[in-house]
């Protein structure tokens, strides 16, 4: 069956109309201990968490202790914060509207609460 001019144009246009597969690149920008583990839900949720679990980062620009505060949540529960000494770049990226992602990199039953959860932060491109 010969192609008509209309069907040829349609055949050529279809690949252009199909949406390209969205591919994102995640760049590791920070690996930090979780600050405040002992004060929030970390202890009660400890047995449910696993390395690799996604975390949610929430900016708290009105935080009275730190204008660059970035809260760390797991399944809607507050676990703590990115450390004050290491949160400025992530806070600035979030303030610019940049997309960031985080995950639990490592869990350790260490006596020091600063060594229990290691958080990785990625910028999503």
Image: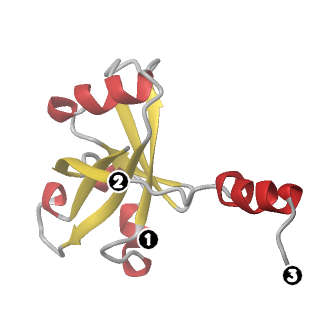
Q: Which residue is located at x 44 percent, y 39 percent?
A: 99
Disc 2/disc 1 C-alpha distance (Å): 30 Å
- 77 relative position to 79: left or right: right
Looking at this view, is 65 or 117 the one in front? 117
Quadrant assignment for the C terminus: top left
Given contact means CB atoms under 8 Å apart, are the residues at marks 2 and 1 in contact?
Answer: no
Q: Residues within 10 Å of mark 3 (few under 14, many from 20)?
A: few
Where is residue 108? Give x, y as percent. 17, 73
The answer to which of marks 3 and 2 sits earlier in the sequence is: 3
Residue identifier under label 1: 45
Residue identifier under label 3: 1
In this rendering, the label closer to the viewer, 3 or 2: 3
The answer to which of marks 2 and 1 sits earlier in the sequence is: 2
Looking at this view, is 39 or 20 the one in front? 20
Disc 3/disc 1 C-alpha distance (Å): 65 Å
In this rendering, the label closer to the viewer, 3 or 1: 3
Where is residue 69? Give x, y as percent. 35, 29
Task: Write down the quadrant of residue 29 in the picture.
Answer: top left
Disc 3/disc 2 C-alpha distance (Å): 44 Å
Whether residue 78 is situated above or below residue 90 in the rendered picture: below
Where is residue 39? Give x, y as percent. 35, 50
Given contact means CB atoms under 8 Å apart, are the residues at marks 3 and 1 in contact?
Answer: no
Q: How many numbered marks appear? A: 3
Looking at this view, is 84 or 7 the one in front? 7
Q: Which residue is located at x 81 percent, y 57 percent?
A: 10
Q: Mark on residue 25? A: 2
């Amino acid at each position: 069956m010969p192609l008509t001019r209309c069907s040829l144009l349609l055949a050529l246009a279809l690949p252009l109309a199909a949406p390209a597969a969205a591919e994102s690149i995640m760049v590791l920008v920070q690996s930090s201990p979780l600050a405040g583990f002992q004060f929030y839900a970390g202890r009660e949720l400890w047995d449910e968490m696993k390395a690799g679990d996604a975390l949610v980062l929430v900016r708290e620009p009105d935080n009275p202790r730190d204008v660059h505060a970035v809260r760390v949540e797991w399944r809607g529960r507050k676990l703590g914060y990115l450390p004050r000494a290491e949160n400025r770049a992530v806070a600035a990226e979030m303030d610019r509207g940049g997309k960031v992602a985080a995950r639990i990199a490592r869990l350790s039953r260490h006596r020091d609460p600063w060594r229990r959860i290691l958080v990785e932060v990625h910028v999503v491109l």
